């Protein structure tokens, strides 16, 4: 059975705009990040925090925290438990279904473990090169496009429903910084690495499902009627004269 992969988006606002009164522990933005948000708001530019829901759990990435998991509301959304690690100035915006995955919980755990051990430990966080949005896109890509990533080497494959504007600011900012190749996130390469570390993660199930769907689609091809076949035969005979 397939599970929806859901992206949750939070607006990061200045302290003056933040009206949250919850006493729940929160992941805090650095002083530089808070200053950055304050400078961007008058310019009409946005800064966002994202997380990914799959099979009843929410996964998100933060500074020092690394990858954290909490329970999630059905269908995405916001709750006291799910926003435990959302930055204190985060205000819930929306949830988007990015696609579906056939990975079971063991396979999801394996993907998370590979990401955590490779490039998404707490010390790897960087506002422009490796932030929560890079993690969300990489994790969701591994979940949804696992079959395509393991089967082929198409580096142009992308999650069509992942909103580009969510991480546009980081991409714009990073273009003006010295780019550390070891620090900068490569979504496709890192999603593929998370899958290929365990050769069977997301492979057997998705391949079987893909094969099944292909055979079903072929069986549903429309058959020509007798009149259509007769007309086609006449056209062929005329073309050979």
Image (tube, helix red, strand yellow):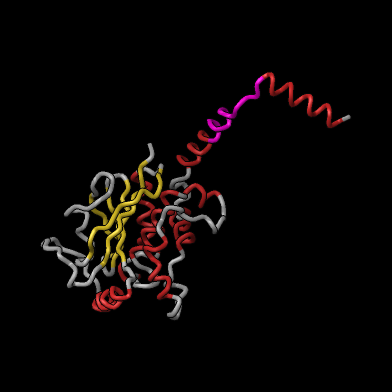
31 in the magenta segment: no
- Residue 28 x/y as whole percent: 21, 69
224 in the magenta segment: yes
- Residue 103 or residue 98, whichever sits in front: 98
Residue that appears at 21% across and 57% down: 83
Residue that appears at 38% across and 73% down: 128
Left or right: 210 with respect to 46?
Answer: right
Residue that appears at 31% across and 44% down: 55
Which corner quadrant holds the N terminus? top left
- Residue 119 x/y as whole percent: 39, 65
- Residue 18 x/y as whole percent: 18, 67
- Residue 204 x/y as whole percent: 47, 41
Left or right: 62 with respect to 134?
Answer: left
- Residue 188 or residue 237, whichever sits in front: 237
Residue that appears at 41% across and 56% down: 162
Q: Which residues are magenta?
A: 214-225
Which corner quadrant holds the C terminus? top right
- Residue 213 or residue 69, whichever sits in front: 213
Left or right: 45 with respect to 81?
Answer: right
Left or right: 183 with respect to 81?
Answer: right
Relative to residue 42, is residue 4 depicted above or below? above
The outermost residue toward the right is 241
The outermost residue toward the top is 226
Relative to residue 16, is residue 23 depicted above or below? above
């Amino acid at each position: 059975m397939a599970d929806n992969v859901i992206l949750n988006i939070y607006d990061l606002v200045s302290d003056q705009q933040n009206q949250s009164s919850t006493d729940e522990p929160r992941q805090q933005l650095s002083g530089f990040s808070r200053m950055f948000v304050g400078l961007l708001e008058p310019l009409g530019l946005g800064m966002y925090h994202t997380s990914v829901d799959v099979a009843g759990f929410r996964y998100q990435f933060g500074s020092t925290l690394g990858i954290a998991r909490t329970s999630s509301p059905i269908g995405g959304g916001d709750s006291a438990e799910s926003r435990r690690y959302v930055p204190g100035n985060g205000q819930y915006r929306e949830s988007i279904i990015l696609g579906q995955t056939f990975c079971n919980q063991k396979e999801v755990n394996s993907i998370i473990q590979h990401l955590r051990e490779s490039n998404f430990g707490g010390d790897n966080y960087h506002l422009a090169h490796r932030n929560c949005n890079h993690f969300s896109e990489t994790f969701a890509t591994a979940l949804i496009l696992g079959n395509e990533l393991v089967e082929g080497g198409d580096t142009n494959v992308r999650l069509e429903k992942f909103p580009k504007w969510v991480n546009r600011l980081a991409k714009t900012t990073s273009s003006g910084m010295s780019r550390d190749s070891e620090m900068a996130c490569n979504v496709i390469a890192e999603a593929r690495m998370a899958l290929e570390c365990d050769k069977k993660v997301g492979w057997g199930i998705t391949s079987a499902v893909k094969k099944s769907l292909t055979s079903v689609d072929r069986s549903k091809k429309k058959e020509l009627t007798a009149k259509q076949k007769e007309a086609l035969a006449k056209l062929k005979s005329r073309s050979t004269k």
